[in-house]
Amino acid sequence: MGKPLHETIQYPDEAFPYIMYTHTNERSIPDGRGINDLHWHEELQMTLVTKGKMTIQINGIDYRLSTGEAIFINKSVLHIVSRLTHGGEYVSFNFPEKLLAFYPDSAMEQLYVHPVTHSSLLSLIIRGDSEWHNQILNMLWDMKQEFEKQKAWGWQYEISIRTVQLWMILVSNMTLPAEEASKHNRLQQERLQVMLSFIHQNYTDNITLKEIAEASHLSVSECTRGFKKSIHMTPYFYLVKYRIRKSRELLDSTDHSVTEIARRVGFNHVNHFIQSFKKHCDMTPKEFRKIKNEQKEAGRA
């Protein structure tokens, strides 16, 4: 079974559910969902580009960010970092909305948190072209330093206070979508997440476009339209792309034959698998495995 779209974040300290990921093209610290890994989570997210440039896709729209720019991503929103320049780096701060509410049913939760987390606002770009943008960016840089240095007594308070201050600036300056648009956009997101999850759970089988559509009780045309609008590809193209991704993992981590790997990721014919792999990766499966093995040998030298 493939990796689920829904990310369950493993906090270093469950008593303080807050985490900062540092992502590069090579790895994520701590281990998390990095480059080219479509996912969503219940937590709110603030992402800051610390080196280079990146492209992040949210609901079918590509946002290009440079060093020193940031993006807020609302809870339960599908997103994927599709490109990060060579030597690039970004950090993501993930935290639950309850951190901002102080306690359940508080005035803060009702007035300043739920209006945002229950809206159709998917994301907000912070580029530094206004005073409040710069305030948020400075806070994110400070929080990065706080996470990276040796944890002093009371550091959880420092992070929590900065996060609440950041949120207050954010909600004071954002404009929320109309309620009807909010319901429609949320429904679209939920349907797409169900269909993508169906693909991730069943990609090894000979699944059809009709079955993908039926997972969200849609017609084939509605399903195709939703995919094209949200992630700029057809359901079939996404299915093949996901199968190729899983095959790369097997080529790198196992000694299975190309024929066996083709079967394991849902291709009925090995020739179709090889053709599809070459189309997506500009090399054959054997060439990909050879490069990976050479990289491992070089790393051991």
Image (tube, rainbow, N blue to C red):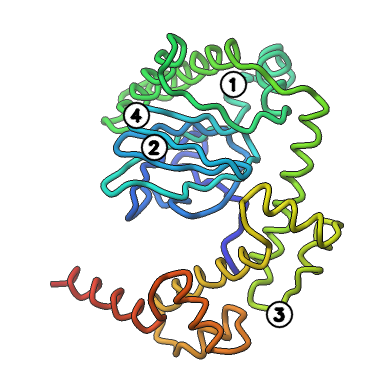
The answer to whether the residue labelled 4 contacts the one labelled 2, judged by CB atoms less than 8 Å apart, is: yes
C-alpha distance separating marks 3 and 1:
45 Å
The answer to whether the residue labelled 1 contacts the one labelled 2, judged by CB atoms less than 8 Å apart, is: no
- Residue 181 vertical position relative to residue 3 in the rendered view, above or below: above
Q: Which residue is mark 4?
A: 144
- Residue 44, picture quadrant: top right
Q: Which residue is mark 1?
A: 100
Write the residue at 67% across / 61% down. Answer: 234
Direction from residue 256 to residue 191 in the image, left or right: right
Q: Which residue is mark 3?
A: 206
C-alpha distance separating marks 1 and 4:
19 Å
Element under label 4?
helix
Query: Which sits earlier in the primary sequence, circle 3 or circle 1?
Result: 1
The amino acid type found where label 2 is placed reads: Val
The amino acid type found where label 4 is placed reads: Lys
The amino acid type found where label 3 is placed reads: Asn
Count residues near mark 4 (Cα–Cα under 10 Å), then give few for <14, some for 14-19, many for 20+.
many
C-alpha distance separating marks 3 and 2:
38 Å
- Residue 215 vertical position relative to residue 109 in the rendered view, above or below: below
Write the residue at 59% across / 70% down. Answer: 240
Looking at the rendered image, the disc whose residue lies closer to the viewer, 1 or 4, is: 4
Query: Which sits earlier in the primary sequence, circle 4 or circle 3?
Result: 4
Write the residue at 48% across / 20% down. Answer: 163
